[in-house]
Amino acid sequence: MALQFDKLEAQIVELGKALAERGQAAAEELRGAIDLLSQLNDLDAIWEQIKIARRNDAGFRGAAPFNEPINQPIPLPALPPRATLFAADGSQIYPDLHAPAPYWLANIGVFIYHHGTNALPEMISEPQLFFGDEDVRAPDGQLLSAAAINARRTVYELQFLAKVVSERQESVPPLVAMCDGPLLHMPFGKEIPDAKQLEANYHEAFDFLIDAGAALLGYVDRPSSRFVLYTLYLMTLPPEEITAANLARVRLEGMTDADLYKLLLPCGARSGMMVQQSPLNKDYKDRFSPAHEIIFFYLNTAAHGQAPYLARVEIPQWVARDKELVDAVHALVYDQCQIADRYPYALTRADEIAAVQPADKRALDERIAIELLRHGQPVEISQKLSMKWRARYGRWQGEGAW
Amino acid sequence: MELLTEAPPIGRVLRASTTGFECGTRSSDLDEPRFGAFVQVRRRNDPTLIIGLIYAIRVDDDPLVRQLIMANNINAATMRDQRENRMVPVEISVITVGCMEDGVPIYALPPRPPLSLDPVYLCDDATLRAFTQRFDFFRLVLQAANVPGDELLAAALRSAAAVRPRSEQTPYLIQAGRCLAQLLGADLPRLNHVLRLIRPA
């Protein structure tokens, strides 16, 4: 049944009005925030406030300056004449009660781009099928949750990227490994079985990349983060008022750091590097290695003449401490964003290589069903799934006639 | 039954009917097929060789190609990646103009269309000469709907003339022109147009 737009009309009008009002309030807040940011020249003063927040256990989750001013654009450096880019992405098929057998699949794609040459880029994909009870079910017997699958796929993605880079560490330097999404995000919570092992594997992949002499970056398109805005709010508080209760009170009216830096960064420029203040990042640094701490900067990926378009680029500390490598990452990421439209070409291609389409899932289910039948196993096609496919696609895959 | 051709296929059948078919290929394989070329396809275990004419070649776009065009910053490596690595599909549309059984041309629609994934080849010279020795396929081309019939027939005749000895090419085209005059006698402007298209240089 089609969506009944006539019943939605009044709600759409209401939505437009509410968003316009919110936009006006946000514009005023933004002007104030920009004034405040422009005055934040003293990095030590920022660090002083952050230290007080730490002492007061105020739960501050903002950004701390790394080793550069945070209120000045850093212009686009010269592009290295040659480099080797390794972009990775992954996709998955989640375990499905209605499939012929319980399984899940991770498919990792790596795209290798030889910057500065006419060489044909390379494509590698690595599908892995998981079907053992211990791989498919949580300790309570239920199929693994989407969160658990996502965590595993993210780890496999970085492991495979590190493996490919290690195997090709003799490629033309600098070697730049890139992932889609943040590096500082691993949800190794209690709901993830083997969380500790996954976390260890994730950081081991970092070490492989360090050994290979490669840079690593996580690319966040259109970031909605507010780390700098939280820092600005922190700077407005007198020391005695830096408490968890006060920090929780901040209202940002839908503003994000990107709104701030869109006004500050010309095309190709980046912000100063910053460290996100979070227990997870502290954990990376303290439990694994200071080199694993995640640093970030904002980058305006728009071409000249285009409206500003922001990305957040996350790099581990081993990259951030190497000025030459940071410049290479900055220039190469911007260059990649100019090939396609404000998003790294290599990541677009890695996504394309990794993507598992619904038709692939149907074909895989069919192939598994045939294999089960070949071994005398009964295969019961889910009636629910069968009817869904009929309704959506007209006929069941493999069914000859309507 | 295998085709008597050593050349690689120009594509494989995507969808088909008795009146024509579409075949798919990759953009990097687009050197050989051309508008007005004769093609041949045979169903597996079927003695009938279906003969067709290419009347359209379409290069499909996709969102990434659009993005690359908008960004207007394509370098040689990206171009190679798009053309050699990516499956940018090209669709070749073919109108069926007859078939051959045991080497004998039949100027009528085949009894069955080819099947999905059947390989499609350019006609080898011998088959092309044999099939075009008579002009009974003209009517199928000129009457086909949604096909640029006049231009297609002219291009097909140039292909057919090209596989004949040089001394036979002009007489062949003159003979084809006489046949066209009979078919298009009631439509002189159209006849003139087609004759101009096939006039030897």
Image (cartoon, coloured by chain):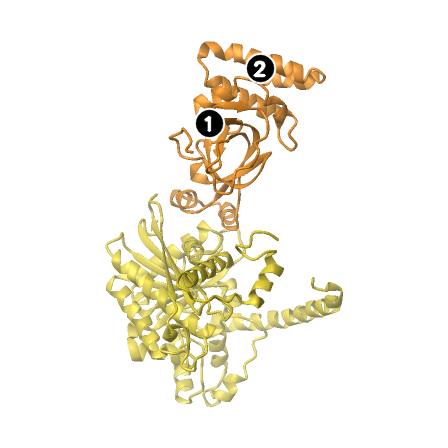
Disc 1 secondary structure class: loop
- Who's yellow, chain-wise? A
Residue denoted by label 1: B123
- Report the chain holding disc 1: B
Is residue B5 in view from this perspective? yes
Left or right: A252 in relation to A59: right
- Rendered position, A261 above or below B190: below
Residue denoted by label 2: B176
Is residue B159 in view from this perspective? no
Which of pointers 1 and 2 lies earlier in the amino acid sequence? 1
Q: Amino acid at mark 1?
A: Cys
Q: Amino acid at mark 2?
A: Ala
Residues packed near mark 1 inside 10 Å, few (<14), some (14 to 19) or many (20 plus): many
Left or right: B45 in relation to A155: right
Q: CA distance from mark 1 to mark 2?
A: 20 Å
- Report the chain holding disc 2: B
Please state which of residues A96 and B47 is positioned toward the viewer in this rendering: B47
Residue A287 position, x and y percent, is 30, 80
- Who's orange, chain-wise? B
Residue A253 position, x and y percent, is 59, 74
Query: In the figure, residue A73 lies in which quadrant?
Result: bottom left
Disc 2 secondary structure class: helix
Residue B189 position, x and y percent, is 69, 17
Q: Looking at the picture, do discs 1 and 2 lie on one chain?
A: yes
Quarter of the rendering occupied by the N terminus of chain A = bottom right
Who's the residue at 36% across and 66% down the image?
A: A156
- Rendered position, B186 above or below A322: above
Q: Residue furthest front?
A: A376
- Rendered position, B113 above or below A84: above
